[in-house]
Amino acid sequence: MHVVIMGCGRVGSTLAHGLEARGHSVAVVDQNADAFRRLGHDFAGITVTGAGFDGEVLRQAGIHRADAFAAVSSGDNSNIISARLARETFGVTRVAARIYDPRRAQVYERLGIPTVATVRWTADRMLRHLVPDGNEALFRDPTSTISIVEVPVHKDWVGRSVLALEKTTGARVAYLTRFGIGMLPTPSTVVQEGDQIFMLVTDDIVNAVTSVAALPLEGGQ
């Protein structure tokens, strides 16, 4: 794939390196040439100085052959204008925009442009850390039958296997995050202190699963 990224801040530069590490070609656009220093000397992609909503600038970045476009600058208006330009003028099918204002994000979603509402996302994540006893779904399938929820576990589970946790709760562990990095557990994976555990549940068992996981193990066994 060839991916054009508008905005070379922390998100844009991290995204560029992640895509390049996966073997994709990347072009990064930013109005501030100094921003490209975030990419480092090992970045092999294209850098173009200019506005991401300028058609000529996007052409220099290879928008005509782009498979995807990401608008992650610090301005909502710039992001949405460039995202619409990439999709409607240049025909890029995979387009996403970062939006700070959650109300705007809902409007742009209705226009068919996927958005990442960073303020809402961050606030939701903080709520889950501060008030972990809620069962708000992180994901729900289209039939609204299966969801993924974060399940806080009792400290007794530290050092125990994920398989044992699944057997005790009757639910499957979808993934966990450790030191801020997501990982897919195997039956032999052992729960470590600080792990965030996310489980696949249905509405009829979610309360039971979260309750059982939060209880101390009998006799410490």
Image (cartoon, rainbow, N blue to C red):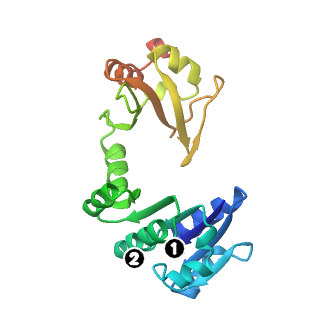
Q: Secondary structure at mark 2?
A: helix
Task: Return the x and y of residue 76 as percentages of the image width and height.
Answer: 35, 71
At 51% from the left and 19% from the top, the residue drawn is: 166
Q: Residue drawn 41% across and 68% down?
A: 84
The image's mark for residue 63 is none
Q: Is residue 31 or residue 175 the one in the foreground?
A: 31
Identify the residue under disc 2.
78
- Looking at the rendered structure, the number of numbered marks drawn on it comes to 2
Q: Look at the numbered disc 1 and give the secondary structure of its residue.
A: strand
Q: Position of residue 4 (x, y in %)?
A: 58, 69
- Relative to 215, does residue 73 appear above or below in the rendering? below
State whether residue 160 appears in this view: no
Residue at image point 33% right, 38% down = 132
Closer to the N terminus: mark 2 or mark 1? Answer: 1
Residue where numbered disc 1 is placed: 6
Name which residue lies at 41% across and 20% down: 216
Residue 135 figure quarter: top left
| Amino acid carrying mark 2 in the image | Ser
Please indicate whether residue 158 sits to the left or right of residue 103 in the image: right
Say above or below: 97 vs 7.
above
Q: Residues within 10 Å of mark 1 (few under 14, many from 20)?
A: many
* Drawn side of residue 191 relative to residue 216, left or right: right
Residue type at tag 1:
Met
Q: Residue furthest left?
A: 103
How far from the left and from the top, in percent, is residue 72?
47, 69
Quadrant into which the N terminus falls: bottom right
- Please say if 5 is above or below 161: below
| Left-right relation of 198 to 118 | right
